[in-house]
C-alpha cells in the first residue's frame, strides 16, 4: 500500500476531480483541453495505484463511490494547499501559521525557557504555533539532527561529535542567586555566603542536572558544605518545595525576579562568579528557521 501511495501525483488527482465534477471522461477531457484517451489513462493509473475503483457507472454518468468521495475531499484540500503555496512563493499572499519546534532538556528551568522563547513568540503571536518537546539532551539532539526539531536549548555548546551537523549560539550568561522563604532566611542569618554552611539545600537529581556542577564547584571553592535535603528532576517541582520552606535553591540570576514573584521567595545572596550558560543549538545549514535566528539576535541585543 505504501508503494501505491507513492505513485499518486497531482495530475492524476486533477483529472480525477474533473471527471468527478462533470460525470464523464469526454466532458472532463474537453474542459482540460486534452484527448479523452489521456484522461482515461490518468484515471486508470490512479485507480490502479489505489487498488480499486473510485467511480461506479449510473446510466451514462460516472458517479463517485464511497472511496471516491474520500479521495475527492483530500484532492480538493491538496489543490487548495498547492494554490496557497504558489501564492505565497509568488509574493501574492502571506504564509499561514508557522510552527516553531523547540527541544528542551528536562533539567532546563521552565522559566528560563520562557524567558528566551516567549518574547519572539509573543511578537508573532498571530502566525506562530510553538511546540516544545521535553526529554534527555541526547534525545533532543538526535531529533534535531533528524530535522524533527528546529532548535534545542542546552547549558553546553555543541558536542564535538555533532559539530559538523550542528552549531550553537550563546543566549545567556548569568550568575547564581540563592533563594528561600523569608522564614528560612531569618533562621540562616544575613552573613552570605557563610550562612549557607550546613543550610538545608534543594538540588538537581544529579551533578549533571542543569547548573548543579556550577553550584557544587562554587561551594567547594569556598569550603562551604550544605545539607542536601531533596533532589529533583523537575525544576518546577524543586521550586514548589522551596516555596514550602524545605530548603534553599540556586537559580540563574537572569530569572531571579520571576522566581521571587511566582513562588514568594526572598533573595539570600548572589554569586556572580558562579556562571550559568544557555545555548541554542540548531542545524548547520543555510536555511535556518527565521524565528530561531530571531531568538539568537534578541539574545545578542539583550
Image: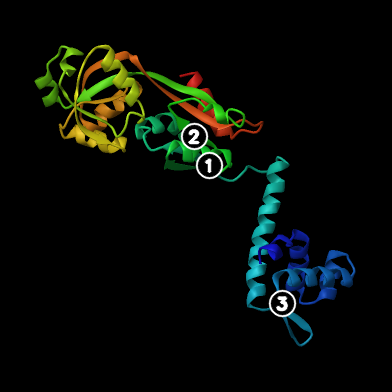
Q: Residues within 10 Å of mark 1 (few under 14, many from 20)?
A: some
**Which of these two is toward me, 117 or 269?**
269
- Label 3 close to label 1 by CB (< 8 Å): no
Q: Nearer the viewer, mark 1 or mark 2?
A: 1
Q: CA distance from mark 3 to mark 1?
A: 40 Å
Task: Say the numbered circle drawn on residue 288.
Answer: none
Q: Residues within 10 Å of mark 2 (few under 14, many from 20)?
A: many
Mark 3 and mark 2 lie on one chain; the one further toward the N terminus is 3
Q: Is residue 204 visible?
A: yes
Q: CA distance from mark 1 to mark 2?
A: 9 Å
Q: Nearer the viewer, mark 3 or mark 1?
A: 1
Q: Residues within 10 Å of mark 3 (few under 14, many from 20)?
A: some
The residue to which callout 2 is attached is: 152
- Label 3 close to label 2 by CB (< 8 Å): no
The residue to which callout 3 is attached is: 53
What kind of element bears circle 2? Answer: strand
Identified at 31% across, 38% down, the residue is 234
**Which of these two is toward me, 197 or 24?**
197
Where's residue 141, x and y in %? Answer: 51, 37
Mark 1 and mark 2 lie on one chain; the one further toward the N terminus is 1
Identified at 23% across, 32% down, the residue is 263
What kind of element bears circle 1? Answer: helix
Q: Nearer the viewer, mark 3 or mark 2?
A: 2
Where's residue 96, x and y in %? Answer: 59, 46
Mark 3 and mark 1 lie on one chain; the one further toward the N terminus is 3
The residue to which callout 1 is attached is: 143
- Label 1 close to label 2 by CB (< 8 Å): yes
Where 189 falls versus 39 (above or below)? above
Query: Residue 29, located in which quarter of the rendered image?
Result: bottom right
Where's residue 236, x and y in %? Answer: 29, 37
Amino acid at each position: 500500500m505504501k508503494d501505491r501511495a507513492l505513485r499518486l501525483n497531482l495530475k492524476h488527482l486533477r483529472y480525477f476531480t474533473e471527471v468527478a465534477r462533470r460525470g464523464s471522461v469526454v466532458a472532463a477531457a474537453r474542459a482540460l483541453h486534452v484527448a479523452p484517451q489521456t484522461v482515461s489513462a490518468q484515471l486508470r493509473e490512479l485507480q490502479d495505484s489505489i487498488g480499486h475503483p473510485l467511480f461506479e457507472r449510473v446510466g451514462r454518468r460516472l458517479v463517485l463511490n464511497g472511496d471516491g468521495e474520500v479521495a475527492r475531499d483530500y484532492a480538493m484540500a491538496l489543490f487548495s494547499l498547492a494554490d496557497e503555496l504558489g501564492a505565497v512563493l509568488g509574493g501574492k499572499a502571506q504564509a499561514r501559521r508557522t510552527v516553531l519546534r523547540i527541544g528542551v532538556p528536562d533539567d532546563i528551568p521552565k522559566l528560563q525557557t520562557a524567558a528566551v522563547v516567549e518574547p519572539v513568540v509573543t511578537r508573532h503571536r498571530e502566525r506562530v504555533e510553538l511546540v516544545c518537546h521535553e526529554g534527555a539532551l541526547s534525545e533532543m539532539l538526535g531529533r534535531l539532527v533528524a530535522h524533527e526539531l528546529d532548535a534545542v536549548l542546552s547549558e553546553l555548546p555543541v558536542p564535538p561529535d555533532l559539530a559538523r551537523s550542528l552549531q550553537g549560539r550563546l543566549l545567556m550568561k548569568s550568575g547564581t542567586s540563592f533563594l528561600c522563604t523569608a522564614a528560612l532566611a531569618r533562621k540562616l542569618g544575613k552573613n552570605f555566603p557563610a550562612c549557607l554552611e550546613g543550610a538545608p539545600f534543594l538540588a538537581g537529581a544529579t551533578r549533571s542536572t542543569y547548573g548543579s556542577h556550577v553550584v557544587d564547584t562554587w561551594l567547594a571553592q569556598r569550603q562551604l558544605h550544605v545539607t542536601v535535603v531533596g533532589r529533583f528532576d523537575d525544576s518546577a517541582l524543586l521550586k514548589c518545595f522551596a516555596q514550602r520552606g524545605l530548603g534553599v535553591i540556586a537559580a540563574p540570576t537572569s530569572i531571579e525576579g520571576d522566581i521571587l514573584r511566582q513562588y514568594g521567595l526572598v533573595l539570600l545572596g548572589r554569586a556572580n562568579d558562579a556562571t550559568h550558560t544557555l545555548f541554542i543549538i540548531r542545524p548547520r545549514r543555510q536555511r535556518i528557521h527565521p524565528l530561531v535566528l530571531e531568538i539568537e539576535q534578541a539574545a545578542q541585543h539583550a
